[in-house]
């Protein structure tokens, strides 16, 4: 009997003694065997079988050990040699503001049109059609134009946002409803793109998109609930069992209501962690209410405990704050002074609230680290696990500080996708020196940081297998560029898995409950069609999710999976 199984048996026995005399009732509800389990637990890294009762894993071990635990009522499942991993945990995710068709990786106008038409069918005729996720390369000559939308929606208004959220393409009907003509002046901080004939092409950049966005119908509580339910199907389909919502305003009333309703109706398919606002002017009363919210939610699928702040913008928009200006000049300004950031971080730290700050440029990252160092010093605190979100271009000298200060590196594997957009922006804007360590997940691992992976959905797809593929190959799904983008920054599959499971759990103080397949933890796991740990890197995307279980409950099962 393995040490793990002993622990589990002791646990079962203790439970049995407490509630009932020993007997068949002690047998686990379910035993899964014949699997290749990557447990994520360094003390017992692999197993072939595990057992589940209620929402917990109760035993992990060999097929013989686990099958011996089965009683007459135990459901025993042969997983046929398939790979099992802990449920994926997306450490940086956002509940979208609206329901939209996903246009990620469309690659062509035809695919964009097909996805939009299909998506639009579920809404009443005449209502707005919304989509997001296109990139200029999806269109001929890199030029998005209203005619591609007019062809499929001649009478129905349509608006589709690009992947990075800096521009929108609308059709003629939407332009008409917004009253945008050749005579309409560009709004401040925005551009209405016009063709050679002076007519709007449908492309609205930055603030110009607001001219159409303000016409969109307000979201009702039912709309938000429908949106949440859609994401509650999307997440388990890609193996996610935990989501950490990094929206800086925290949940709106509608969103909180939707999450609570989903819990009541048994439709929340993930452990959901929501942020609260990180604000300079937060009062002691507000801070106390944030702490109480988290305490009150204990034991449910919804938790809080982290405050989200924003410190800079993005490299693409040249708004990420850099220690040295961008190539060709210009720089991003931090959204807060160091003094205010220090004082605010110290205030939240003192109240016992974890802080997560969006910082992409090396200057912003350093400011966040300095603020956390300051907070720990003035408050005499430790172990708050404050986080820096994104950290796309850190200064190399700052990398050891993550470990030294106990700060979590919350990075997004899919940000390293070397698509046309990345290649057009990173090296040209940052120069080869800084670009060579952009989104370099290996450097955080080498520096001994706890690195939690997330997606930044809906900016990028939430699929963790896609994230693992990108972190491991530093190539697009099409396999470009050959050899990978700064391939010295690749990491292994096992490291990537850890960042999506055990490290992401640590980042939300949940490592005793989640992140590994270990007796006593939530039964959060995924069965995969192919062995991620054995596939050659270029074939990692062949691995599909067959079964997702969250807290002992099946949240997704592939149509063709019947073990
Ligand atoms: Zn984000």
Image (spheres, rainbow, N blue to C red):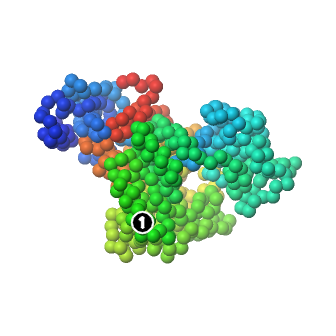
- Residue 35: percent from left, percent from top: 32, 31
Using the rendered image of the protein, determine whether residue 155 is visible from the camera's viewpoint: yes
- Quadrant showing the N terminus: top left
Residue at 45 percent of width and 28 percent of height:
558
Query: Residue 428 sits in which quadrant?
Result: bottom right
Please name whichever residue, 329 or 482, is drawn nearer the observer in this view of the structure. 329
- Quadrant showing the C terminus: top left
Residue at 68 percent of width and 52 percent of height:
214
- Residue 253: percent from left, percent from top: 51, 52
Say what secondary structure mark 1 lies in.
Answer: helix
Residue at 47 percent of width and 68 percent of height:
282
Residue at 28 percent of width and 40 percent of height:
56
- Residue 300: percent from left, percent from top: 36, 47
Please name whichever residue, 418 or 150, is drawn nearer the observer in this view of the structure. 150
User: Residue tagged by mark 1?
Assistant: 287
Characterize the local packing of mark 1: few (<14), some (14-19) or many (20 or more) Cα atoms within 10 angstroms.
many
């Amino acid at each position: 009997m393995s040490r793990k199984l002993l622990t589990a048996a002791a646990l079962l026995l203790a439970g049995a003694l407490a509630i009932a005399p020993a007997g068949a009732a002690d047998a686990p509800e379910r035993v899964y065997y014949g699997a290749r389990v990557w447990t994520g637990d360094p003390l017992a890294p692999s197993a072939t079988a595990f057992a589940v009762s209620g929402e917990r894993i109760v035993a992990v071990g060999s097929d013989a050990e686990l099958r011996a635990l089965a009683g007459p009522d135990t459901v025993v499942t042969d997983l046929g040699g398939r790979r099992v991993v802990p449920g994926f945990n997306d450490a940086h995710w956002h509940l979208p503001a609206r329901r939209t068709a996903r246009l990620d990786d469309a690659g062509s106008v035809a695919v964009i049109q097909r996805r939009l038409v299909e998506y639009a069918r579920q809404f009443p005729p005449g209502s707005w059609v919304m989509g997001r996720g296109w990139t200029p390369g999806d269109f001929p000559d890199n030029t998005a134009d209203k005619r591609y939308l007019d062809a499929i929606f001649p009478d129905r208004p349509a608006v589709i946002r690009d992947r990075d959220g800096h521009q929108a393409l609308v059709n003629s009907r939407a332009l008409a409803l917004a009253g945008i003509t050749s005579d309409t002046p560009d709004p401040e901080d925005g551009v209405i793109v016009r063709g050679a004939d002076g007519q709007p092409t449908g492309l609205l950049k930055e603030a110009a998109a607001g001219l159409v966005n303000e016409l969109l119908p307000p979201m009702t509580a039912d709309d938000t609930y429908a949106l949440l339910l859609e994401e509650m199907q999307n997440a388990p389909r890609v193996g996610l069992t935990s989501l950490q919502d990094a929206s800086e305003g925290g949940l709106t009333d509608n969103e909180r209501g939707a999450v609570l309703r989903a819990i009541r109706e048994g439709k929340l398919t993930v452990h959901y962690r929501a942020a609260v606002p990180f604000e300079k002017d937060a009062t002691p009363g507000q801070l106390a209410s944030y702490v109480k919210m988290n305490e009150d939610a204990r034991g449910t699928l919804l938790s809080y405990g982290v405050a989200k702040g924003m410190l800079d913008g993005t490299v693409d928009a040249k708004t990420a704050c850099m220690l040295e200006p961008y190539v060709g000049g210009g720089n991003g300004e931090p959204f807060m002074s160091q003094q205010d950031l220090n004082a605010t971080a110290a205030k939240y730290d003192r109240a016992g609230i974890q802080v997560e700050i969006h910082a992409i440029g090396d200057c912003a990252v350093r400011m966040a680290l300095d603020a956390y160092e300051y907070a720990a010093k003035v408050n005499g605190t430790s172990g708050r696990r404050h986080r820096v979100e994104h950290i796309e271009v850190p200064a190399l000298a700052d990398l050891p500080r993550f470990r030294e200060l106990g700060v979590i590196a919350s990075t997004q594997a899919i940000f390293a996708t070397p698509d046309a957009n990345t290649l057009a922006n990173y090296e040209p804007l940052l120069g080869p020196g800084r670009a060579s360590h952009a989104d370099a997940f290996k450097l955080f691992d080498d520096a001994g940081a706890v690195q939690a992976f997330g997606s930044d959905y809906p900016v990028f797809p939430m699929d963790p297998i896609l994230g693992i593929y990108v972190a491991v190959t530093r190539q697009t799904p099409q396999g470009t560029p050959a050899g990978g983008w700064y391939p010295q920054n690749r990491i292994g599959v096992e490291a990537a898995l850890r960042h999506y499971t055990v490290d992401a759990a640590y980042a939300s103080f949940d490592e005793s409950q989640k992140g590994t397949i270990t007796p006593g933890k939530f039964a959060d796991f995924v069965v995969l069609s192919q062995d991620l740990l054995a596939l050659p890197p270029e074939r990692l995307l062949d691995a599909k999710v067959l079964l997702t279980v969250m807290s002992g409950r099946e949240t997704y099962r592939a149509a063709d999976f019947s073990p």
